[in-house]
Image: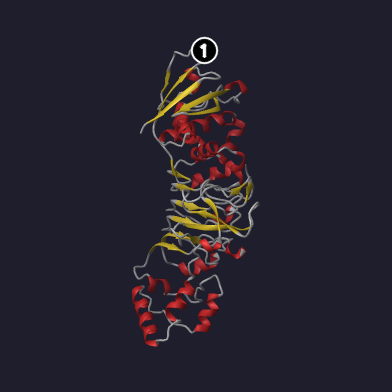
Amino acid sequence: MEDDIGLRVCDSEGHRGTIRYVGSVEGTQGVWYGIDWDSETRGKHDGSHNGVKYFWTHSTTSGSFMRRDKLNFGSSFMEALHRKYVETDNELTVRENVEEVKASINAPFLELVGFDQVHEEQNTNKLPIPNDTSGVMEQIFPQGHIHTLTLGNMGYIWADILKLLANFPVTCLKLPSNRITTLDSVPGMFSSLEELYLQENNIVDWGEVNALGSLPNLKYLNLASTNLRNIKLNKEGHYHEELLVLWDHISQLYYLPKLSSLRFTKNPILAEERVVSSREKTIARLGGLKLLNGSAIERQERQGSEYDYIKEFGAVWLDENRRGEFLEANPRYEYLVKLHGPPLKEESAPVKSRDIIQITFQSDGQTVKKKLPITLTTAKLVNFVQRMFRNSGNPSMFYTSEKNPSQRIELNSESLQEIGFYNLTEGDTIHVTFDD
């Protein structure tokens, strides 16, 4: 049953998901299957039960436990082929079906093999790639180009992919859950590649990603759950062996200028960070990003993140003895200084405990208390309250003070002023109203 982990399944209503756990669940009997559903609305939790974490999910509400008999495992390609072309008593029907398929996929090389050979292939998890692949892709795709090719959970290694796609251009290549651990390329091989999906392959070192060579048109790179441990690039795309602070590794993605969407989850660096904080740090370092973990990056959010990035490392940048090494690890920082202006010495001082105040937020009957730095900008406060109250509408905000309850002070949600500018103090209440 443990062999089922990683398989794709669906339920009676057609919802699709991935098996992440097979086994017992405390307080229950029998075997349960832990499913991470593609849709976060299908599940109920994050893979936990009674405080015990049983499996990882991509969302806090995409996980659920199911019995095996409630899951549809579908059929493998070889099983379907066997049923359609071998389990029949009419040889003429078989040959007619084969000719029909050959014509429909423009594959004149397709041959019907004997039952023994089909049965042997059914016992593997991999569709073998022919030793001689010359002309194979051209026969399947006579137009000479593939837009999207998906080869997920096929057991392939990278050498199989190179052999199959040698000198054949592809725009979107999806290779999740294979046995890829190393990567390499030949000059210009993936010059037209715009999207590359390598999630759930055991690629430990960013040096393997660098081995792909130049990817001038890459816009989307998915390396989720690959166990990557470091990232280090320079302008020429060369790799350096020394390990750096992990956020410096993220900064190196700056050298992929067309990277517009990034999924950055289930990574050790996130264990010590709040979700909002890790998102801000990623946005500030990667100027070309439009989507982060599937969520659009708004102009106000980007500006606020970049201002905080400048302030956070202002003291290091102002120190001329440390600036060179710092900019090598944070290549976008210099550009942001030119864009927004250099950090001030007083802004670069560490935030003191007295600069953290507790604020009460109220919105539509909900009350939440949070501690915030007075250096937080109102533009970033907008993003903060949207996430806190799970409402994507535009918020209108004003605050009241216990010292003067009759006074109502409006907060300009489009301003880059810090909340300290409005003289917010400990115990004040911010009232939030969202547009419909």
Above/below status of 165 relative to 66: below
At horizontal 45% and vertical 60% (from top left) the residue drawn is 12
Q: Nearer the viewer, residue 91 or 109?
A: 91
Residue 102 position by quadrant: bottom left
Name the spot of residue 88 as percent of width and height, x first: 43, 83
Instruction: Name, please, the residue furthest toward the right.
Output: 26
In which quadrant of the rendered image does the N terminus lie?
bottom right
Name the spot of residue 152 as percent of width and height, x first: 50, 63
- Say left or right for 49 vs 108: right
Above/below status of 332 relative to 64: above
Task: Confirm whether residue 344 shows in the render.
Answer: no
At horizontal 39% and vertical 83% (from top left) the residue drawn is 94
Name the spot of residue 392 as percent of width and height, x first: 41, 37
Describe the element under mark 1 as helix, strand or loop.
Answer: loop
Name the spot of residue 86 as percent of width and height, x first: 45, 82
Q: Nearer the viewer, residue 256 or 353?
A: 353
Q: Nearer the viewer, residue 5 or 225?
A: 5
Task: Confirm whether residue 134 shows in the render.
Answer: yes
Above/below status of 78 relative to 207: below
At horizontal 47% and vertical 53% (from top left) the residue drawn is 38
In which quadrant of the rendered image does the C terminus lie?
top left
Q: Amino acid at mark 1?
A: Lys
Which residue in the protein does label 1 denote?
Answer: 403
Residue 356 position by quadrant: top right
Classify mark 1: residues with Cα within 10 Å, few (<14), some (14-19) or many (20+).
few
